[in-house]
Image (cartoon, grey):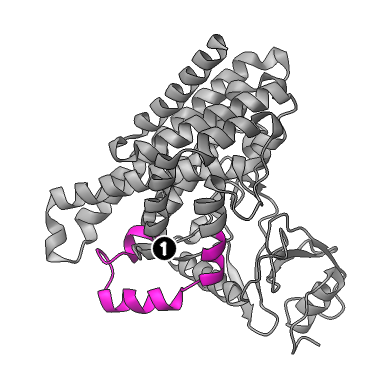
Amino acid sequence: MFDQFFVMKAEDAVRYVKEKGFFTNDARLEAKEIGDGNINFVFRVRDTESGKSLIIKQGGEMARISDEFKLSSDRVRIEYEMLTFYNERVPDLVPEVLAYDDRMHCFVSEDLGSLTIMRDALLARRRLPHFAEHITTFLVETLFYTTDIAMDPKEKKRWVGKFINPDLCEITEDLVYTEPYTDYRHRNDLFEPNRAWIERMFYEDKALRREVAQLKWQFMTEAQALIHGDLHTGSIFVDEQTTKVIDPEFAFYGPIGYDVGNVLANLMFAWGRFAYAPSVAPKENVTEVKDYVAWLEETIVQVADRLIEKFLQAWAKDARDPLARDKEVAEAYVRRVMADSAGVCGLELARRIIGLAHVKDIVTIPDDEERKKVERILLRAAKHFIFERHSLTSGADFIQILKTAEMEEEQDESGA
């Protein structure tokens, strides 16, 4: 039955895992399509007697978010190979992958259903004490060790070809780097109370567009490391002890800062929500919410600073090129990574507010005036991150940008 591609439904997923030998033919199974992403189909198949469960992820020929995006099924192969690589490099930080099927354009993996998507955990104000350590280990182990600094250059060039991903790169180039500053395809989805303000602050800012153009060319041309390509809080499962990264289908050889900047920006969405939208929590929890905002700020600082520390440690230990053994060379490289990360942080903040794909942190703010303020603070910060990216060298610098954006918004409000 599964010798020719078709888009599966839940009942097909049950038949699939039985035919492929993951469950016996007499197993009592239930399946549910649980994908909440923009592109693929995800099925959880569970044995109702033993409790054993698996995940099937299948990619169709177009994105779920819009039939304008026609996609190659090769992205499923890339995601499977990325997860296989991650299992070799950081097995404790990713799900186990069990099989790949190039006919059905799907793979089977461990079910992480006992964990929570990180975005939902943050919305519930859960503290994740190990996240900064876990994610910086993941970033250094998967990024530094796929650069020319640590990898055999010939092997690295073979990997560049292996992970070419033009369809999904085009989505990023359009939705992240182009449309939030032009809306030339009219796919942007602006919050109406901020429409005129965004059009003035973003569409009409030629200097901003020039800076974004530089970042876009870098994304398109700099094969620095094998990046995840979509590393936000919706692509990470967590609990208070565990971190598991999923969904690396956007992977390709690109700038390290793209992954780092995405992580930082998505922490900032939660920060903005709880710092400036009091309606999202009961009034009696004011102190608790303030403490949570402080934890988010501390986590942002830790992610940036521990990344720098671990990257330099890995460099000192495992840099292969003789020219890379100079400490000042390593420090200059890391400064560039942090500058790129700051720029991408700004891009991610902007595109999730202005562009086609929003985040729950912002769109579920119930009070329109509060949402308006949160969006403006984060968009002001986005511009600072892009314009001032070369001056950011520590986690504290990222927090200072947020505080500057807050002050600017308060001044505008008081002067209105």
Question: Which residue is nearer to you in this view: 92 or 195?
Answer: 195
Please tell me how crowded label 1 is: few (under 14), some (14-19), or many (20+) other residues with Cα within 10 Å.
some
Residue 352 x %, y % = 59, 43
- Mark count: 1
Most common secondary structure along the magenta stretch: helix
Q: Is residue 147 magenta?
A: yes
Q: Secondary structure at mark 1?
A: helix
Residue nearer the viewer, 333 or 50: 333
Task: Judge whether residue 217 can be spotted in this image.
Answer: yes
Is residue 64 covered in magenta?
Answer: no
Residue 61 x, y percent position in the rendering = 69, 74
User: Relative to 307, does residue 222 appear above or below in the rendering?
Assistant: below
Q: Residue at the spot x=60%, y=42% of the render?
A: 354
**Which amino acid lies under the numbered mark 1 shown in the image of this protein?**
Met
Q: For the point 29% across and 40% down, which residue is it?
A: 390
| Residue range highlighted in magenta | 142-171
